[in-house]
Amino acid sequence: MKQKVLVIINEIRAAKSLGPVAELKEETRLREDLSLTSFDLAELTVKIEDEFDIDIFEDGLVNTVGEIIEKLSK
Amino acid sequence: MVFLYDAETYSYEELLNAISGSGEYCPLFKSKELFPYFANLVKALAAGMPLILIDSDINASEIDGVSEEDINVKKRFEAKYYSSMDDVVAALQQSQSEITIFTSGTTGQPKKVVHSISTLTRAVRQGKRYAGQIWAYAYNPTHMAGLQVFFQAFENQNTLVNVFGKAREEVYQQILDKQITHISATPTFYRLLLPFEKSYESVVRVTLGGEKSDQHLYDAIGRIFPNAKINNVYASTEAGSLFAAKGDCFQIPETIRDKFKVVDDELLIHKSLLGSSESFHFSDDFYHSGDLIEWVDKEAGLFRFKSRKNELINVGGYKVNPGEVENAIMEIDCVRQALVYGKANSILGNVLCADVQLEEGFALTELEIKKFLASQLQDFKIPRRIKFVEEMSLTRTGKLKRS
């Protein structure tokens, strides 16, 4: 699951001409560490929803990779 | 003289025989067959009888005020006798019939609009110079565009070749076989004819309507039909035909310029130009057309359509015109058709998505499309999720299905 999220994040970064991230840590912050804008986060939610059928932002902001994994594990 | 080529061939003689001396018609006729539909239509109009036009596949429950038991019920009237088709055309032109048509219902329930022959045939040109034309009939016959083409062809006793809903190969076959001279259809129809493989010399006029088109498409059409003049028409279910086209621009005729207003880029039309409908809401006698325009030359009344108002997608506070993004995607050579739409999203309100149909045998990645668009468009206009599809869905009136 973490691997799939990594693939999606790297797809988003590639479109912005940013290099791929090698691995994701629990405390990695989406905006500050991965340089994702709100548009990127929107894309992230749509693609994660396509894959896992869960809207991770449904009940509030998600700031770190750890929080994404938590929502997907429910 | 052939009237209609469909599964069978029908002459004007046969049409005349179907109408003359008959005192029976269906006010609410539902049929999958084009000839009986037209015969019923012409018979009723020539005799001044009222008609309600419904799609061949509609369910009465989908339309307010139409009940299943009234469909295809025959009604009697005083039979008229016509000695020639000229007499029928003349009778039709002076008809006082009330003709009820419905919008295609893309935004909810179909809306009912009542027209007269005068509002329905405002743009028809009749005369010797229009004789002998052979039309590809590419519209739904129960809606405004299909009626516009029908009346233009019928009043000049031209030939119609039914290609509505037909596959690409068959359309080309008919163009060649019947030596079609005139085609009037939606941009979506023409895109389905791409890519260019060979040219067809018989076509002298290509008309586009119903959707916004683009230069890329005009260029492609120009290659497939090298002898054709290309023009646009604007006709709505509410108003019929209103403007003359000048390339991809339209011009408001000087004589009726006071019947139009533009407020917040939206075209407003005076009620005197419309058919009648309970669903029309007027602000100071003006109707909101829902079409957003931009002036090319305000003094001369020259303008261009930008988009439908309700098609604009709000993405993170930015309003995106899906047509503009679709055109950009279709600049890519191997893309046949693109549909851009919004998907509800908790962060941005809507996320911009695109369905892309590629030409056969080609491959393209989402990343390649995004990189290309980044050189053409601002960031917020770039679709974030791109799916590759085999086919596009169309509405009842042959336009791209947007919801």
Image (tube, coloured by chain):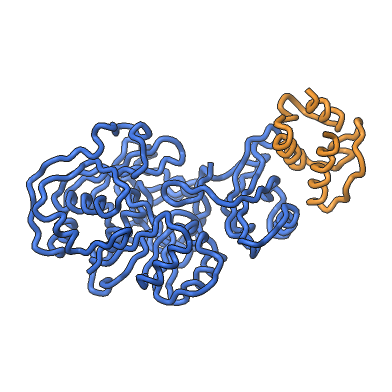
Chain colours: A orange, B blue
- Along the horizontal axis of the image, is B23 left or right of B280? left
Q: Residue at x 37, y 64 (%)?
A: B136
Q: Where's residue B130, x and y in %? A: 27, 71
Residue B111 is drawn in which quadrant? top left
Q: Is residue B17 above or below residue A67?
A: below
Residue B57 is drawn in which quadrant? top left
Residue positioned most to the top = A74
Q: Where's residue B19, x and y in %? A: 15, 54
- Along the horizontal axis of the image, is B112 left or right of B230? left
Q: Nearer the viewer, residue A31 or B252?
A: A31
- From where the camera sits, is residue B246 visible? no
Q: Where's residue B81, x and y in %? A: 7, 56
Total marks placed: 0
- Along the horizontal axis of the image, is B213 left or right of A3? left
Q: Where's residue B79, x and y in %? A: 8, 49
Q: Residue at x 39, y 65 (%)?
A: B183
Q: Residue at x 36, y 36 (%)?
A: B59
Residue positioned most to the front = B8
Q: Quadrant of the N terminus of chain B?
A: bottom left
Q: Nearer the viewer, residue B317 or B376?
A: B376
Q: Is residue A72 above or below residue B289?
A: above
- From where the camera sits, is residue A44 visible? yes
Q: Residue at x 37, y 37 (%)?
A: B281
